[in-house]
Image (tube, grey):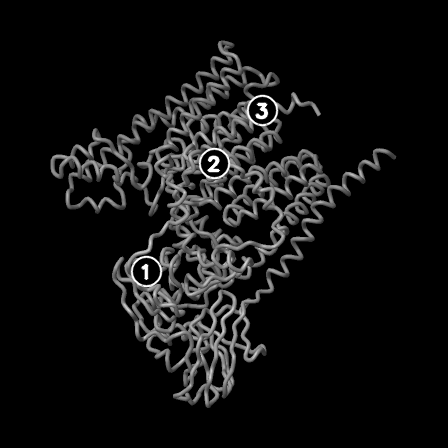
Amino acid sequence: MNFKKLLPYIGAIVVFIIASLVYFNPVLSGKQIKQSDITQFMGMSKEIVDYRVKKGEEPYWLGNAFSGMPAYQVSAYYPNDFISVIDNTLRFLPRPADYLFLYFLGFFILLTALKVDWKLAILGSLSFGFSTYLIIIFGAGHNAKAHAIAYMPLVVAGFVYVFQKRYLLGFVITSLAMALEVYTNHPQMTYYLGFSLLIFGIVEFINAFKKKELPTFAKQVTVLLVAVILGVATNAPRLMAMKEYANFSTRGTSELTISPEGTPKPKSTGLDKDYITEYSYGIWETFNLMIPRFMGGGTVEKLGEDSNFYQTLEPKAGPATAKEYSEQALTYWGAQPIVEAPAYIGAIVFFLFFLGIFLVEGRLKYWLVASVIFSIVMSWGKNFSGLTNFFIDYVPLYNKFRAVSSIQVIAELCVPLLGVLALKNFFSSKIDRKMKEDALKKAIYTAGGITLFFTLFGTSLFAFEGIRDGQYQQLPELIDAIISDRKSMLFSDSIRSLILILLSGGLLWFFLKKKIQQIPVIVALSLLILFDLVSVDIKYVNKEDFTSKRRVQKPFTLTQADKEILKDKSHYRVIDITKNPMMDGRTSYFHKSIGGYHAAKMGRYQELFDYQIAKNNLEILNMLNVKYFIAGADKVELNAAANGNAWFVGKIDVVNSANKEIKALDSINTKQMAVVRTPISKTNFEVDSLATIKLTKYSLTDLKYESNSAKDGFAVFSEIFYKDGWNAYIDGKLVPHYQVDYVLRGMEIPVGKHSIEFKFEPTVIKNGKLISLLAYLLILLIPVGWWYFFQKRKTA
């Protein structure tokens, strides 16, 4: 092995480590980043974590949120997760520097696969990793998304090697990269990557068809399919559990054909279209990919004392108030509900992308340009409704994901990739100088022309009115002031992008004229790109987002209300009525809550909330055993009417549709009657007034009750029904139980004294465990067998 050849790659890794730690330098002093979604996650997963520590095993169920739900998509460790060893080895830096390092490393490997010189590969990797969207997702806590994005280039690298006919290397990288990609547990990002890979495959097919090399193409596709399937199969327990739960989640099919208001609605097979497209990128907003604050930046921005907003407010409210409001000014004037920051890819990076369009030839360019156009058009969502609705209605799984603007991650990958390939060609001696000069001019005219146009005319093209401007109605002058500041942002950032493009273009022009050597040009371009991207990134994710480790790991503080409730050691549920229960992970941190925070709640439970709880139907809270209402930090209300853990009912109302089932809860007395869809042996029971049924043991996966009744009865349990996992036993014998009252469990209890037990015994994990083990064996054995076969053939 030639150590000198390895030195540049070792140096690249050192550069990536330094860049990651310098940007997130607070981690060096032991601080951790505050992430809102992760804080909510810690509330959701608290009971699971405690169970894991105490029992040393995985429960796969949680009881402290949404009255109970599978833990598959919250916090779960799966058997045979050997790929996690590789992932943990690669993510050796403190979080979130580990993910930033992964961005750099994955993109570097992809560029190496494309035979890009290591110096340009470092430049390209930094361009990709510091892309603003990829940085701002850390502030929100979208760690799984960042994790999935980081492995995208590695998956593409595997495809590249296979289409280069380096089959063994391509197979190994593709299978391992897919295993890592799926392991990150962000199906939406992996799904979007699939579209880009499909475009890649189509371009390769067209090329093979033209060259009459379809048998070779078929061989390549076969290798890739086997590698992808095996990589995916290593995650079989996770994926099978996800698939099972998806059918019952908000992303599955709903049987309801009426709205909460009672009006007709179509039967849903996934998320609602309005929900899917709520975060749709504006068509004009697309220009903030190369002009950062084209639409005002994030939802709120810090404006200085020289801003029109501050100058207007200060005489009326005083310096202190003016400063406070100026630091939370509503500058964003696009149509999305919330925007953390612009998804800025970079003025220089986009300039290089245009250079690639004019200079790079062949299949890679067609794939990258097509992928960028596809991702941007699809990110428009409801602003390009014809195409979006087609995908929602007819493309499998598209209606399972929300925030269509996220598909721009494909552009985040492909724009810098073509930009680096453009530099590779630009510095190549094999390409005619005149061709380079023409391409450079066209790129400057295109990228520079766009930014120059908005510099000159941008402030007169739009009204600059935002959807939240009504908040300033009490002082109408502020609306005019904020509009002036929005115009200033567009103007100044357009000039900024124009200058950066001209500087970059100038460097390349002087190189062509042999005024500057290649290495200084690469160094100067790298510094310009870093300045361009990092100066934007740092406005939105910086040292202010970090705090002490203790505060991150213990994000919530007990209030007087919490302390009062926790004196009660029985099994009950809590609701915080001061906030939206369905967006509240805090309550779940201390109590068993009927709310929580999760993007894929159980579908029926969400419907119960929308159709009943949101309408203040207290009878539903009673059946969920809500014993305490949090009405403030020091205010608790006791609900004496809560039904308890289990109770006998006298009448069963059997209905034949989900509509009737949810409507029956409008006026039902849940202590006396239960609603079911499944026919049972009898519908009327004589309730023994002295009958008792009590919870004697509570565990996440094991609930025990003791019943005593002089008559046969039907009991309802204030626990969530989930057929693919929970089994019911009476005196140790497996017995059927039913879904009642839309979400709860019920069963017939024979006369006398009995021990009743519910056990969570999912089979999906065991089945997936065997598949994943087989996949790992094949990933190891196929390359060994492959190598042995060809070595033997060479010898022969």
Q: Can you give x and y, in whole percent of width and height, for residue 253 in the image?
A: 48, 63
Mark 3 falls on what kind of element? Answer: helix
Mark 2 falls on what kind of element? Answer: helix
Name which residue lies at 46% across and 28% down: 349
Left or right placement of residue 537 versus residue 330 in this view? right
Left or right placement of residue 434 versus residue 82 in this view? left
Residue where numbered disc 1 is placed: 562
Q: Nearer the viewer, residue 331 or 721?
A: 721
- Is residue 672 placed above or below 333 in the rendered structure? below
Give the class, few, some or many, for how many residues have Cα within 10 Å of label 2's Cα (few <14, many ≥20): many
What numbered label is drawn on residue 118? 3
- Is residue 27 placed above or below 63 in the rendered structure? above
Count all numbered tags in the image, as a single digit: 3
Question: Which mark is first along the chain, 1 or 2?
Answer: 2
Q: What's the distance in space between the residues labelled 3 and 2, CA to CA?
A: 22 Å
Q: Quadrant of the N terminus?
A: top right
Mark 1 falls on what kind of element? Answer: helix
Q: Quadrant of the C terminus?
A: top right
- Is residue 110 placed above or below 685 in the rendered structure? above
Q: What's the distance in space between the residues labelled 1 and 3, CA to CA?
A: 57 Å
**Residue type for callout 2:** Ala
**Residue type for callout 3:** Trp
Residue where numbered disc 2 is placed: 97
- Is residue 32 placed above or below 645 in the rendered structure? above
Name which residue lies at 45% across and 32% down: 130
Left or right placement of residue 147 versus residue 347 in this view? right
Q: Can you give x and y, in whole percent of width and height, for residue 241 in the image?
A: 56, 59
Q: Can you give x and y, in whole percent of width and height, for residue 451 in the image?
A: 36, 27
Give the class, few, some or many, for how many residues have Cα within 10 Å of label 1's Cα (few <14, many ≥20): many
**Residue type for callout 1:** Asp
